[in-house]
């Protein structure tokens, strides 16, 4: 607002201002780490990973030869992926990489500094280790820096001169680092880990004694003192920073760092205060978690730590753990993550880009890692258990903005979801450093009654919880030849409790379709019908539209629960969709785009690229007014085909490959009323007078956002089906639907009830599956096809198929189980 900043590679006034301001920021960074330009140089990078890559590429590696074994690259096994990845660059130069276990460094005996011989003509070696483990928070001794550099502590034996890279990215966010005392050769940093902003900006601090050794091949803009385009002539700039900062640095982000340091100092009083504050919170939480027990004495969590949280010198404000059940079995981190989100708590899960520490703490062998990969598990996914063994853990961490109330909220979440109210355990008193002790008792956050008084809903209101799979999926279907007279296609106004005449409510007998729902707008309310046309992508217009934010990101009820209050109605005769919501005038949207005016844009659904078009400013203003933030309605382009082959690994010819609308996984989702009834019994509670209360079945059904509801005969029998026929339509059962926290949202109010997810998890042995996916191959559209309430459902069991090939989805579920 007050200055104009120009490209620093020029001499005009605005460019000179940029250059001078950036230099001042370099001084500020060095002062923060108790050093000066006399001893260290700041090289700005795209992040700490880019800083590590720079060292790997520029370090003066010596390849083995007749005169010696060459350089060694040693790294602690408790290192970030970006550190371990440096070994690939070393390997390209035939340099040996050696992983070093923490216990080997702890037990290594120091020796005479002269034992390895003089440094002259000795090959340079590089040892990398983290100041703080990003997995467990253990803080490794900074004294290793001088011990390794002097030769008194050797990661491996042999002659040579050792240099030390201290990965300080995780450490410096909550602790001071004094480089006047601990003079590592290279220190990579990430500024967003300190301030939260700006992202994509880091730095490499280089010891000026080591800087002359760095070699550089590529040169970019701003790094050359002189060069010739027609001849191999290049002279680098004298300044180390200018020599290694290729191109124009992100100077506005660099200037923002100055304000970050100012704010940090003003709000906290300095890094020492931050260190004490964050450690106290972590110590308090660690003590409380460690003390939690089930009534049978079994621990509620298993914590992965190398310390007892005795001092901030040895432990950072990080706790890595897994939640256990009362039998000692681990509950997958994916389920814990989903439950935490319901309590507005965001946790990190997996191995946190630190496979070495993950393997050591969880007891995962190298062979198991390879086996998990073959089973389909990759870093960052939600496959949390394989053969009952964890593939990762849950991590919580504290920053300078964290409060004692945050720690208490997290502990209450664990108690509320793992210990019954009758087993409730008090939180420990606050430590002397904290102002105000937590309450003596803890209650679950969910205080909603199990039964609530409500009006009888319309089908459009009642069936609109969008699970991960269906939750983000409007549908575009070729409607040619699929628009019979209005009397043949009925959008009903009956409630889900009003089943078709003569249809049994579950007991013995044949399977029958009791309800049909489509969800024209992804994650919005359901539109219930009794008979509806079917196209190549599923029910006609099912999930053809979706609501996106101003960045074009698809919104679901996980981010915007009030989407369930938006009710779409399809009128096939007038070729319009009418959208209603309380307090808003209804608005009409045409079913098909005007090809001359529609502007095609790119969107994403579950990592699939889809062609869509914006439905206009009028409906956008309507949505923005209702939600109080800018939203747009977009529709899948009718001439775009989204191939289902990628979703389920069916290696089919293009002529038989099924296509999808904006659904997440499959064309249809089916649930069984008998399964819903069993879940209802699990959710039953008793009031203070001993009277049993439960959520009505017709309150539960909409939460699962299914297209087809059957009466069923036994709970969860649908998971044993391989195929089904409904009338003249034939479907393949792809596998169970894995649920997310959206099933906790009451589709009448948009309010959450965490018990639904937790009870389903307990009943399904932590897999949280409910309902099955269906898919049919492309249909012959020369004549119309329909699904109707009252149609008989004929299932074929898996064991009745002589040559049965498991779908990818089913194999995935088998791996998890």
Image (cartoon, rainbow, N blue to C red):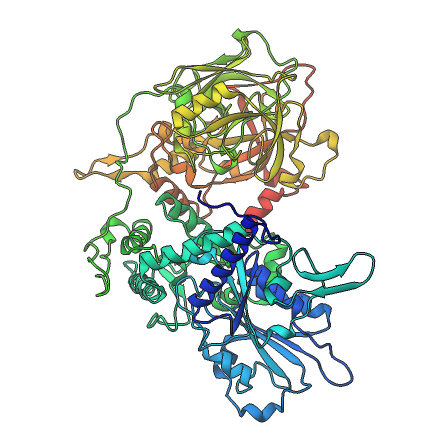
Residue 387 in view:
no
Residue reaching furthest to the right: 230
Is 315 in front, or is 787? 315
* Residue at position x 34%, y 67% in the image: 272
Is 686 in front, or is 89? 89
Numbered circles on residues, count:
0
Q: Choose top left, top right, bottom left or bottom right for residue 678.
A: top left
Pinpoint residue 478: horizontal percent, then vertical percent.
Answer: 64, 20
Is residue 325 placed above or below 727 in the rendered structure? below
Residue 38 in view:
yes
Q: Choose top left, top right, bottom left or bottom right for residue 564.
A: top left
Is residue 240 placed above or below 741 in the rendered structure? below
Is 3 in front, or is 84? 3
Is residue 428 placed above or below 149 in the rendered structure? above
Pinpoint residue 641: horizontal percent, then vertical percent.
Answer: 67, 29
Compared across the picture, whether 784 is left or right of 132 comes to: right
Pinpoint residue 736: horizontal percent, then vertical percent.
Answer: 53, 40
* Residue at position x 19%, y 57% in the image: 436
């Amino acid at each position: 607002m007050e200055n104009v900043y120009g490209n620093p590679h020029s001499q005009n006034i605005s460019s000179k201002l940029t250059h001078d301001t950036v230099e001042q920021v370099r001084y500020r960074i060095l002062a923060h780490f108790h050093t000066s330009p006399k001893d260290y140089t700041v090289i700005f990078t795209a992040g700490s990973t880019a800083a590590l890559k720079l060292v790997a590429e520029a370090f003066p590696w010596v390849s083995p030869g007749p005169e010696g074994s060459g350089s060694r690259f040693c790294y602690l096994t408790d290192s970030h992926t970006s550190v371990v990845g440096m070994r690939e660059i070393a390997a390209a130069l035939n340099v040996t990489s050696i992983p070093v276990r923490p216990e080997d460094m702890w037990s290594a005996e120091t020796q005479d500094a002269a034992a390895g011989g003089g440094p002259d003509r000795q090959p340079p070696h590089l040892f990398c280790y983290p100041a703080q483990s990003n997995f467990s928070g253990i803080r490794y001794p900074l004294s290793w820096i001088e011990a390794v550099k002097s030769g008194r502590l050797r990661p491996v034996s042999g002659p040579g001169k050792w240099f030390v890279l201290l990965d300080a990215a995780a450490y410096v966010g909550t602790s001071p680092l004094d480089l006047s005392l601990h003079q590592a050769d290279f220190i990579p940093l990430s500024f967003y880990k300190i301030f939260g902003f700006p992202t994509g900006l880091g730095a490499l601090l280089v010891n000026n004694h080591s800087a002359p050794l760095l070699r550089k091949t590529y040169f970019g803009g701003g790094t050359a003192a002189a060069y010739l385009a027609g001849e191999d002539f290049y002279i680098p700039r004298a300044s180390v920073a200018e020599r290694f900062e290729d191109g124009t640095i992100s100077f506005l982000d660099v200037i923002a760092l100055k304000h970050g340091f100012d704010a940090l100092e003003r709000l906290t009083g300095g890094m020492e205060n931050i260190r004490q504050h964050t450690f106290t919170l972590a110590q308090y939480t660690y003590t409380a978690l460690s003390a939690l027990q089930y009534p049978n004495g079994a621990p509620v969590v298993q914590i992965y730590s190398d310390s007892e949280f005795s001092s901030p010198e040895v432990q950072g404000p990080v706790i890595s753990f897994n939640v256990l059940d009362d039998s000692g079995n681990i509950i997958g981190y994916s389920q814990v993550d989903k439950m935490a989100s319901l309590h507005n708590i965001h946790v990190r899960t997996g191995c946190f880009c630190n496979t070495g520490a993950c393997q050591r703490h969880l007891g995962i062998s190298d062979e198991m890692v390879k086996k998990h990969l073959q089973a389909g598990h990759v870093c960052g996914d939600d496959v949390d258990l394989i053969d009952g063994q964890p593939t990762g853990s849950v991590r919580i961490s504290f920053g300078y903005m964290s409060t004692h109330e945050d720690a208490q909220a997290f502990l209450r979440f664990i108690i509320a979801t793992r210990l019954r109210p009758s087993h409730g355990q008090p939180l420990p008193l606050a430590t002397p450093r904290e102002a105000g002790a937590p309450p003596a008792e803890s209650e679950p956050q969910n205080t909603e009654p199990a039964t609530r008084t409500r009006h009888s809903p319309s089908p459009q209101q009642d069936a609109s919880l969008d699970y991960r799979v269906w939750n983000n999926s409007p549908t575009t279907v070729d409607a040619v030849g699929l628009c019979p007279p209005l009397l043949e296609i009925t959008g009903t106004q009956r409630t889900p409790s009003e089943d078709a005449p003569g249809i049994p409510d579950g007991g013995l007998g044949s399977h029958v379709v009791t309800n049909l729902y489509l969800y024209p707008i992804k994650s919005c309310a359901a539109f219930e019908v009794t008979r509806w046309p079917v196209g190549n992508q599923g029910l006609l217009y099912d999930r053809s539209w979706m609501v996106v934010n101003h960045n074009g990101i698809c919104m679901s009820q996980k981010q915007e629960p009030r989407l369930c209050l938006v009710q779409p109605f399809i009128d096939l005769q007038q070729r319009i969709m009418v959208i209603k919501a309380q307090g808003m005038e209804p608005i009409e949207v045409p079913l098909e785009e005007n090809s001359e005016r529609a502007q095609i844009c790119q969107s994403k659904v579950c990592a699939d690229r889809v062609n869509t078009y914006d439905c206009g400013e009028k409906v956008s203003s309507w949505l923005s007014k209702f939600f109080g933030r800018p939203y747009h309605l977009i529709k899948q382009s009718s001439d775009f085909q989204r191939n289902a082959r990628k979703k389920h690994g069916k290696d089919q010819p293009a002529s038989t490959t099924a296509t999808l609308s904006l659904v997440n996984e499959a064309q249809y989702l089916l649930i069984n009323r008998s399964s819903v009834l069993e879940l209802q019994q699990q959710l039953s509670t008793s009031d203070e007078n001993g009277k049993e209360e439960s959520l009505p079945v017709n309150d539960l059904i909409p939460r699962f956002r299914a297209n087809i509801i059957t009466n069923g005969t036994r709970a969860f029998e649908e998971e044993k089906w391989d195929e089904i026929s409904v009338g003249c339509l034939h479907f393949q059962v792809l596998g169970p639907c894995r649920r997310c926290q959206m099933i906790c949202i009451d589709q009448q109010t948009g309010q959450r009830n965490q018990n639904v997810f937790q009870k389903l998890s307990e009943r399904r042995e932590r897999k949280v599956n409910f309902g099955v996916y269906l898919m049919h191959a492309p249909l012959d559209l020369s004549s119309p096809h329909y699904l109707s309430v009252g149609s008989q459902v004929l299932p074929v069991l898996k064991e009745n198929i002589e040559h049965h090939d498991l779908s990818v989805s089913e194999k995935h579920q088998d791996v998890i189980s």
